[in-house]
Amino acid sequence: MSLGTTGLNDTITKEFLLGKFSEVFGDSDGARVFFAPGRVNLIGEHTDYNGGHVFPCALNLGTYAACRLRNDSLIRLYSMNFEKDGVIEVDVLTDLKNSKEYKWANYPLGIVYTFKMHGFNIDRGLDILFFGDIPNGSGLSSSASIEVLTGFVLSSLFGLNVSKKELALFGQESENKFNGMNCGIMDQFASAFGKKDHAIFLDTATLEYEYVPVNLKNAKIVIANTKVKHELTTSAYNDRRRESETALKDLQAVTDIKSLGELDEESFNRYSKAIKDEVCFRRARHAVTENLRTIEAVKALNADDLETFGKLMNGSHRSLDLDYEVTCKELNIMVESELQVEGVIGARMTGGGFGGCTVALVKNEAVDKVCSEAGKRYEELSGIKPEFYVIEVGDGPSEL
Ligand code: GLA
């Protein structure tokens, strides 16, 4: 079993990336290197497009870019994660549209497009080499990290002074409109606002946020990668979003609310008969209870009450499984396997669901055991060898 970070980010240096940049683009004169992180969400899942709270933190894993402006209008993009795709070349003045042939590059290109839509004058191209150390398809927001990174690169190279909030909002807009995934704001916000050793308690209705120290003296945050990614992710995600909106519309016929995040349990119980469809009712119940769990969890963390935090994580997973139906067999096996290990305080799926990772709060002395025992049980029941990462909470975007 592997334990640790992906092990890659210790070896990623500016020199290494500039060396690769030279190999691909001829030389590295004047090139600069930037980084933006991925995220893990501790609690508050599928609440960010329902006006609720989320509680993510940035990772010290993410995406790097070595880049330099060009004197013409070509963007030439290369990813060390998709070397087979070679250099993808696009004219920023004439060819900026989502296209199958641009493959992974639709993510950074969407940001260039979104900047232009917001009136920023991106009239020159650039050479840009990406490298990501977030495990592929793990649900730790590699797409948000490349979006925020590209925004940060454009802001830095063109001297645009784009704020963190705009970086997050442009990232979300690009993902929604350019790439067709109706995600909420959480991932891009976590990447843009990341702060070392802190999680971000964000109210997605107002974008007000608070940094909460994650000083776990006796415990660690352990991510387990189930190594599965089920195909229906985007369409099922967009379905969940629609079902939540249908529930909201039904509720708005009987109470004056703008989002599900405004309801507490009592008001939900009072009005929920208005939700006509049983599935939409359960989606709304998750959005409401998950928001309340998130608020409680932050209170518990501030009071150093990890036991309560862990119970809320377990409740979150159950609700995501039964009411929101975004877990899958492998995520459930992993969470159950982790919870069987003594010293695991709480465990849940993290991110959009349908595969990807779980996040667990684990007492220091049980970390190795989780990896070996839960890992073994998971492998026996699913036939897949998982990976475990003990994470550190990192900062937002930076230049190396
Ligand atoms: C994905 C989306 C986020 C959020 C989570 C679920 O990661 O990108 O906006 O909705 O799923 O909490």
Image (spheres, rainbow, N blue to C red):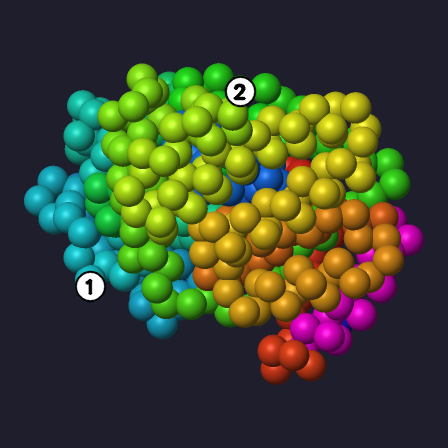
Which residue is located at x 57 percent, y 69 percent?
A: 330
Rounded to the nearest angstrom, the CA distance separating label 1 from label 2 is: 39 Å
Q: How many marks?
A: 2
Q: Is residue 3 among the parts visible in the rendering? A: no
Q: Secondary structure at mark 2?
A: strand
Residue 294 highlighted magenta (yes or no): no
| Residue 365 located within the stretch drawn in magenta | yes
Residue in the picture at 62% in, 55% down: 358
The percent position of residue 399, horizontal first and vertical second, equals 52, 34
Please say whether residue 73 is visible from this viewpoint.
yes
Looking at the picture, how far across and down is residue 77, in whole percent? 31, 53
User: What type of secondary structure mainly makes up the magenta span?
Assistant: helix
| Amino acid marked by disc 1 | Glu
Please provide percent x and percent y for residue 48. Answer: 43, 34
**Mark 1 CB near ligand 1 (8 Å cut):** no
Element on which disc 1 rests: helix
Q: Residue 319 in the image: x percent, y percent?
A: 54, 48
Lower sequence index among marks 1 and 2? 1
Residue span colored magenta: 364-379
- Label 2 sits on residue: 209
Q: Nearer the viewer, mark 1 or mark 2?
A: 2
Q: Seen in the image, is 265 located left or right of residue 337?
A: left
100 is higher (above) or lower (below) than 393: below
Identify the residue shown where x is 59% and y is 32%.
294
Residue appearing at x 79%, y 47% in the figure? 345
Instruction: Name the disc covering residue 101, or none.
Output: 1
Say few, some or many: other residues with alpha carbon within 10 Å of mark 2 (under 14 / 14 to 19 / 20 or more).
Answer: some
**In this view of the protein, which residue sits in the foreground, 241 or 350?**
241
- Camera-nearest residue between 195 and 355: 355
Q: Residues within 10 Å of mark 1 (few under 14, many from 20)?
A: few
